[in-house]
Image (spheres, rainbow, N blue to C red):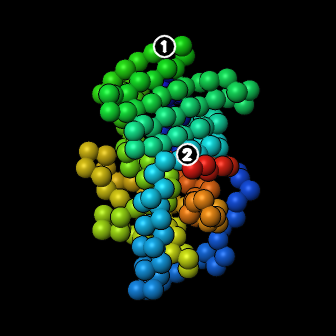
Amino acid sequence: MKNWIGLLLVIWLSGCATLPPDSQHADLTPELLQAYEAHSEQLGQFDNWRASGKLAFISPEQRQSSRVNWRHSAAETHILLTNTLGVTLLEASQNVDGASMTVDGEHYQGQSLADLIAQLSGYRAPFDAMNRWLTGYADLKTINDVSLDSNGYLLGFSQYLPSWGMWRVEYNGYYPATDEQPALPSQITLKHPNLTLKLAISRWQSQ
């Protein structure tokens, strides 16, 4: 069970997206920070979405991969993991009433998704923060070691979260903005001591 629950903590793998034009690391000039704030404002309004792709979970002891469908709104977060044949491996959700998870045919309930995962596997991950990180959003007032590209999109940052410790978040690609949605990440890597979580998003959808 621990292997598949560990997969839920993940977020990388291929994809057809490329980095935006001129996406090299850039100096944090006032103009670049203004571009970042404009992008962040767009991301702040993009709060009802679905991301699908592939994920990988890497620790010193093991490496696992799966397909993932991650859906988020103000009311609920829902995560579905399947294998290459489309068979459900794990399904979990969280809303105002609490969290639930089904894995290996067994159903579990708890106060929050983070608490439920920790109780069942020993892994701990800040899912509320991950919902924001997934879209490429972070508050500059709460992060360190910030790197932006020349469009003002995040390339990487470090963030310390009380009770969760230090996390490093890196973005290796973005889909260009469209009329329906802002520029969104295609490849994301989350690093925590002895744990690396990678996600390659093949498709974003606004809900």
- The residue nearer to you, when weighing 87 against 77, is 77
Q: Where is residue 167? Give x, y as percent.
A: 39, 54
Tell me how many marks there are.
Answer: 2
Query: Is 143 drawn above or below residue 117 in the view shown?
Result: below
Question: Residue 10 vs residue 117: left or right?
Answer: right
Quarter holding residue 149: bottom right
Q: Where is residue 64? Give x, y as percent.
A: 60, 35
Query: Is 123 drawn above or below residue 200 in the view shown?
Result: above
Q: Where is residue 33? Give x, y as percent.
A: 42, 79
The residue most toward the top is 105
Q: Which mark is residue 207?
A: 2
Secondary structure type for disc 1: strand
- Residue 65: tell me if it is visible: no
**Residue at the spot x=54%, y=13% of the render?**
105
Q: Where is residue 128? Give x, y as percent.
A: 37, 45
- Residue 140: tell me if it is visible: yes
**Residue at the spot x=61%, y=55% of the render?**
187
- The residue nearer to you, when weighing 120 against 175, is 175
Residue type, label 1: Glu
Q: Measure the alpha-carbon separation of dots 2 and 1.
A: 29 Å
The answer to the question of whether label 2 and label 1 lie on touching residues, with beta carbons closer than 8 A, is: no
Question: Residue 204 vs residue 111: left or right?
Answer: right
- The residue nearer to you, when weighing 104 against 136, is 136
**Residue at the spot x=44%, y=48% of the render?**
131
Q: Earlier in the sequence, mark 2 or mark 1?
A: 1
According to the picture, the residue beneath numbered tag 1 turns out to be 106
Secondary structure type for disc 2: loop
For label 1, count other residues whose C-alpha is less than 10 Å away and answer few (under 14), some (14-19) or many (20+). few
